[in-house]
Amino acid sequence: MATGQKLQVLNALDTAKTQWYHFTAIIIAGMGFFTDAYDLFCISLVTKLLGRIYYHVEGAAKPGSLPPNVSAAVNGVAFCGTLSGQLFFGWLGDKLGRKKVYGMTLMLMVICSIASGLSFGHDAKSVMATLCFFRFWLGFGIGGDYPLSATIMSEYANKKTRGAFIAAVFAMQGFGILAGGIFAIIVASAFRAKYDAPSYEVDPVASTVPQADYVWRIILMVGALPAALTYYWRMKMPETARYTALVAKNAKQAASDMSKVLQVEIEPEQQKIEQMAAAEKSGRGSFGLLSKEFLRRHGLHLLGTTSTWFLLDIAFYSQNLFQKDIFSAVGWIPPAKTMSALEEVFRIARAQTLIALFSTVPGYWFTVALIDRIGRFVIQMMGFFFMTVFMFALAIPYDHWSHKENRIGFVVMYSLTFFFANFGPNATTFVVPAEIFPARLRSTCHGISAASGKLGAIVGAFGFLYLAQNKDKAKADAGYPAGIGVKNSLIVLGVVNLLGMLCTLLVPESKGKSLEEMSGENDEESGGAGEEAEYNNSRTVPVS
């Protein structure tokens, strides 16, 4: 499609005023992310309870807890599934179409959410094995939602507010985390009112009532509800015009679908589509992911999106290292032995809800409000910069923050770090890969970028769990080897964020540009100078 010969249906989408269908698409795609966040983060609300129920040790001074290897499996298996799903469904979304695959991921999430709470057997080994099995496949479905939701929203949006719409879909994660915490509070409160129990130090056995086994199952299974409610509306959405026209080469269907959505008359322009198809057959504009042409045009872009998402998620998911210190410092979670099992669930859920309400959710919506005004590049660079500053500010005077009277300051600094993660690279790394690659590779490249991020999440959540252990093995948590300590871990995380700033220089700015301008699809048939100009224009900085 040479410049000036852009399909009318794509032009109509780019210039459309914000309409009701935009908000419908945000809600339909966003409810998937609401479910994703609920399912991924609710496990952290119930791991302590699982330890008390299935790993109680008679006569122990502290309540039972999951052994390190079991804890890593229960918490990490969904991440592994998500990484696999991002790669597989990202590729499948470009092969079969966004809509066809979108329903598959949702049904997988519904089935596996329910199955997660129906773990077979009564002994610890069988319950944990089946829980891990179903959470892997739950993660697999969740993984598919990343590239598909981002791609669908980017292809439906107009170019003026596209960033805000994609970011709004991602921001539904914040509400999912919030909903998980609130629902856990409600369930734990209801069971506490019905089945009162003493603290562990008063009566170790009676502190965990038999009915507590229902609590974690209910919390996990309810994650199926929002996904199930969204399924009908996902199936009613038409395929995106960009996939139908540019990939499936069906101009008539694309024009018909978008005429209904936009409520305007759109000419099919099948002749232009046939010209594009002929050009692809002759070898122009049909390069694949592993081709030299892709490497020349988008190789640095893909390196930029994968590296920034990888580095961001190392820092973002390392927050679990400090939560127990922070929650105990402000008195939100007292020592485990002073609580019953259900009270511990209640207090953990309340603490996570407060963090989500005052730090996580606001950051997401600051991005939504400002991304199309100041741009993706500025927000990402600023976010990494402040995360670097706050990590070093926590690390260098760490001994100062460890004193009880200074703990509130530590909490404020910690909260600001993750506010700027969400009003920063946590949102932009999701948005940009959906905007800068060609339609036929868009879902695949977003899936690769997201999978790189999830690899960073595994490093952040589990690598640093071992790394941050006390240098003295005697003072390390039970079952863990000696590490480099929290202070040195924070310094490493500061360096990770600094590297994130440098890698951001590889990511192009897409504010105010159409998807075809960013991907170079406008010039795929004009060849030569036009291609090179478009390629160079999409850079943030010159690369020698």
Image (cartoon, helix red, strand yellow):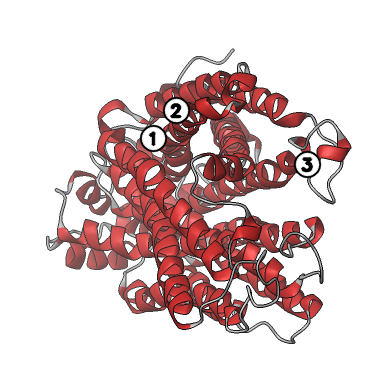
Residue that label 3 marks: 466
Q: Which residue is mark 1?
A: 423
316 left or right of 181 in image: right
Image coordinates for residue 99, horizontal then vertical, percent? 42, 68
Q: Amino acid at mark 2?
A: Gly
Q: What is the C-alpha distance between the residues marked 2 and 3?
A: 26 Å
Where is residue 513 drawn, in percent x and y?
31, 34
Viewer-proximal residue, 48 or 89? 48
- Amino acid tagged 3: Tyr
- Real-space Cα distance between discs 3 and 1? 28 Å
* Quarter where residue 144 is shown: bottom right
Earlier sequence position, callout 1 versus callout 2: 2
Q: Which residue is mark 2?
A: 383
Q: Residue 81 at x, y = what percent?
A: 66, 62
Local crowd size for mark 3, using a 10 Å CA cut-off: few (<14), some (14–19), many (≥20): some
In what quadrant of the picture does the N terminus appear?
A: top left
> What numbered label is drawn on residue 115?
none
114 relative to 405, above or below? below
Q: What kind of element bears circle 1?
A: loop
Q: Tell me which residue sits at (23%, 58%) in the image.
A: 23
